[in-house]
Image (spheres, helix red, strand yellow):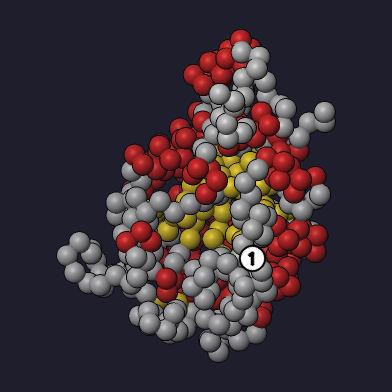
Amino acid sequence: MAQPLLFTPMELRGVRLKNRVVVAPMHQYAAVRGFATDWHLMNAGRYAAGGAGLVIVESTKVERRGCGTVGDLGLWEDGHIPGHARIVEFIRTHGAVPGLQIGHSGRKARRFRPWEGGKPLVNGPGVEDWEGWELVAPSAVNSPESDPTPRALTRDEIPEVIERWGQAARRAHEAGYEVLEIHAAHGYLIHQFLSPFSNLRNDDYGGSELNRMRFCIEVVESVRAHWPTEKPLFVRFSVDDDAGWDPDQSVRLAKLIKPKGVDVIDCSSGGMRGSPVVSAGPVTYSYQVPYAAKLRREAEIMSMAVGLIVHADQAEGILRRGEADLIALARELLYNPNWPMDAAQKLGVDAEFSLVPSPQSYWLEKRARQVKELVPSTFREKLGA
């Protein structure tokens, strides 16, 4: 059997991934004043120990105003670096490449955690620096209409916000991350600039398509100025948002930022109208993969597929058909943090369980060698009486 592409190593600039399985950034809302906690160490560590090639830590905010909730992770001050460095070292020690997504919530900031209802916060006990935690956006347009109206960033403020992205990239490098992703999707600040639904400006950051792209392009430039050349840079797009931003525009933007040092487009969708996905069809297996295929083909840039990728052969098929270069999983890894190890077994590779650390691989390999008829619990629901 040919080596599965899913478990073929990949070189990105000066970084080598042992396989194409990527842990997508997933908000944990477990930070305290932006500082990482033991939950972050455990959460990222279990994915590294499960065999993933790249572990991307959740969206980490570039400034205080950008926090979506009281629990958002931060890199807006140097004091946040040691907590990230601890996570980085743990990921690397257990065989994965440490990555980080940086972001800014814009008008979607200052909210309750999703499991607390996700509604806008109110000023009261337990909410620190309320006035400093300001809702800002390209335009004074709320989303949805019942939400508080943000303040439109002035023209003079925009370069300051862009520089904060660059400084966050510097801190990410100092913490030891090897891959960085810019979050330009899901209705957050960069996406708010891109979409005519939320950007009603009439200066050089609004109006025409190129003007609306300007903020994203300049964020990429700022990040690259502080992020080493030998380290890869990803950007996450909502390739289609069902609100005026579409796949063709995403292709055009990708073509503009690729020569500025972007290596991979992480292809997601939705988020502008409050829904996590677009209304282009049912949410089913691989529903967002066509976006990754389009960007890869038409923008001639590497792409990462994400969105209800659940099974090993499903992921392998996406790569074999040339629809993406990397496979990102999120909620399926919450269900099974050992998914990469499990997928390798199902695809008939890694009999020695070398994807995972020795305290796991020794015992699993020994069991597989001693018990020839063993069927792991993830292979089928039930094995006879």
In the image, what residue occupies the spot 43% across and 60% down? 62
In the image, what residue occupies the spot 37% across and 66% down? 118
**Quadrant in the picture for residue 350:** top right
In the image, what residue occupies the spot 76% across and 45% down? 317
Viewer-closest of 351 and 23:
351
Viewer-closest of 315 and 132:
315
Per the image, label 1 sits on a secondary structure element best described as loop
> On screen, 191 above or below 381?
below
Q: Quadrant of the C terminus?
A: top right
Residue ranking furthest to the front: 385
> On screen, 314 above or below 223?
above
In the image, what residue occupies the spot 52% across and 39% down? 336
> On screen, 142 above or below 37?
below
- In this rendering, position of residue 10 left or right of residue 63: right
**Quadrant in the picture for residue 1:** top right
- In this rendering, position of residue 309 left or right of residue 66: right
Estimate the x, y position of residue 146 in percent, counting from the top left: 38, 82
Q: How many marks?
A: 1
Residue ranking furthest to the bottom: 202
**Residue identified by numbered label 1:** 282
Estimate the x, y position of residue 132 in percent, counting from the top left: 29, 70
> On screen, 33 above or below 54?
below
Q: Amino acid at mark 1?
A: Pro
Estimate the x, y position of residue 368 in percent, counting from the top left: 62, 16
Is residue 97 shown to the viewer in this render?
Answer: yes
